[in-house]
Amino acid sequence: MRTERSGAALLEVVVAVTCALLVVQLALSALASARRAEADLRVRSERIGAERVSRMTLRRELRAGVAGRDWVVFAPDSLRVRGFRGRALVCPQPAGTTELIVSFDGLRRPEPTKDSLLVLDDAWTWTAVGLVGVASVPVACPQAPTTPAERWEISVPTARPIVLVRLFEPVSYHLSTSALRYRVGGGGREPLTPEALDTRRSVFTMDSSRVGIRLEAAGRRPWSWTAYLGGGG
Amino acid sequence: MRSGALAYDPLGAATDFGYGPLGSRLDVAGSDRRGVAIIAVVFLMLAVTLLAHGLLLLAELELETSRAGAASVAARFAAQVSALEAAADSGAADRHSTPLWASSDSTFAPVPDSIARDAGLAVRGGYRWARLVRLSREVWLAEGHAGIGGLARHLAARPYWIADAPARVAAAEAVLVSESPDSTLVEGMVDAAGFLTVSAVPPPITCDSVLAALDSLRVVPMPSLRVAGPGTLGRALGPLTIDSLAARATAGVGGTGTPAPNQVGAACVMGPWNWGDPLRPLGPCGRHLVLVAGADGLRVLGGVGQGLLVLRGSATLTDLDFRGMVVAAGRLTLMGSTRIRGLVRASGGVGVGPDARVDGSACWAAAALAHPALRTPSPIPASGWIDGR
């Protein structure tokens, strides 16, 4: 009788340990799957983020300018643009002056040390000039005395009266060191996207006057995305 | 007896598992394992739950970002649509009385359903407005602004050119401008003496306002003839090419013909060869000024007309009495007793016969350039969308 009882106990222990191991195994599998899914989702999220940032940022920059004049592609990995940051209406005044009374509206305040201007004259010609100074003291435009205005100084007088001004800063975008990066003036290259790209294969593409981008990423699941950015009329 | 207890009470043994007759040995062998398994499973399930929550959070953030992106795109489109609508609405007759730096009345409207639908948004509280600001006599800025349900807002602007008759007349470099020195032969008269005077038979507009505007634009005495070098004249009228100008014409003619007023009773009957009646300004066709496009090789034999004549190529005008402005992409030949009062511009050269003459007239040129078809705004070349806050 004692022998039968001992055998039953061993069997029960084996079954219990097996069940416990099975449960642990299942739980570990679930954990591993969840970690894989989380890692995959994070990678996908980073790639979608890179795609979104590249598309929205670069399209916005290119849409605001004209190919050749305001942006140039240095294939395969660089793009130089005039990053427009605001516009100003110019109080009517005669040609040949370097002082403008303007009503400015922009993403940030103008900074003469790094900003330049693209000015439109009354014969609808755009010209780039330097921004020398900004007097933040409010002044009045006789044609619109209630509109807030300020005085700007430009580097050279223009032959015709200026009617509209666009403020821009020189910006370049680069596909380098695993990310899309931007550089303002002579500053360093700051990443715009997560460092998840294979920048040896990612390129800016030129087709006639149309510019596009192809982003690639290596890894367990290789990924590629191609899109039109701007140009082509 | 112990075995007998198990044998006669199996249910009891099961329910008393671990505490029955075998309990002492089972307790020793299995107590640690049971606890570890439960704790391990609990911790593992907790970890899985945390990861699942992380995934949900990530997905939710992605959804919010995507929604904001879609709203941003929809706001941009709505702002651009508003600006385009403001520009398209600028054909109003009183537009030219708008002072500089002043704007048209702002127009408010909800965001179009189609834009919201295309962006996959259920927009509530979407709004947009637009206005047209006058920057100079001929340069305007169409501004559109849109907001999408507190998620995004956008300002889009675009500069436009709208013809202003006095400014166009002031921009003329001479009464007769030719671009081809080799093909320019003037045997007849080109006279600029009466350019700023009111002619004996004035056009159906107020000449005084034109002359006052020209005076404010400081127009120097207009030269009678200017022969420019090849390729130096630029576009036909403002930023308009000859083709885009011809596309605005209300009538087109080709071959050979004679323009003449066509009237039935007190009504002026429109037609491609009815170019108005400058000889009888109070007649039925006296106020009819044309914007007519002529095909290459057009030959006009006699007749009268008034308005803006756009020639897509070369043309020969014989014994025609025309008042207004003539713009030719090719060579223009004036033969016989042809007389033109106003302004002439020919990119392919010009020939003025011994009995033909061109008399400069600011009033007649301004009258031709005041045609309603020229009030349609034209986007200024090399100007993209100007985004703002």
Image: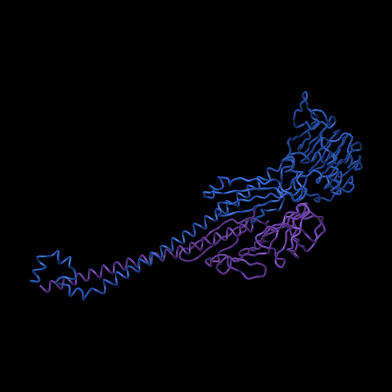
Chain colours: A purple, B blue
Looking at the image, which is closer to me, A86 or A117?
A86
Residue extending furthest bottom?
A: B28
B60 to the left or right of B342: left
Residue B146 location (% of width, % of height): 61, 50
Query: Residue B156: percent from the left, percent from the top?
Result: 65, 52
Report the front residue among A226 and A65.
Answer: A65
What is the x, y in percent for residue B259?
80, 31
Name the foreground residue: B100 vs A192: B100
**Picture quarter with the N terminus of chain A:** bottom left
* Figure quadrant of residue B277: top right
Is residue B233 depicted above or below B291 in this figure?
Answer: below
Q: Residue furthest top?
A: B265
Number of residue marks:
0
Q: Does A123 sit above or below residue B281? A: below
Name the image quarter holding residue A116: bottom right
Residue B192 pos. (x, y %):
90, 43
Residue B344 drawn above or below residue B52: above
Q: Which residue is found at the position 32% from the left and 70% from the top? A: B40
Left or right, A35 with reference to B331: left
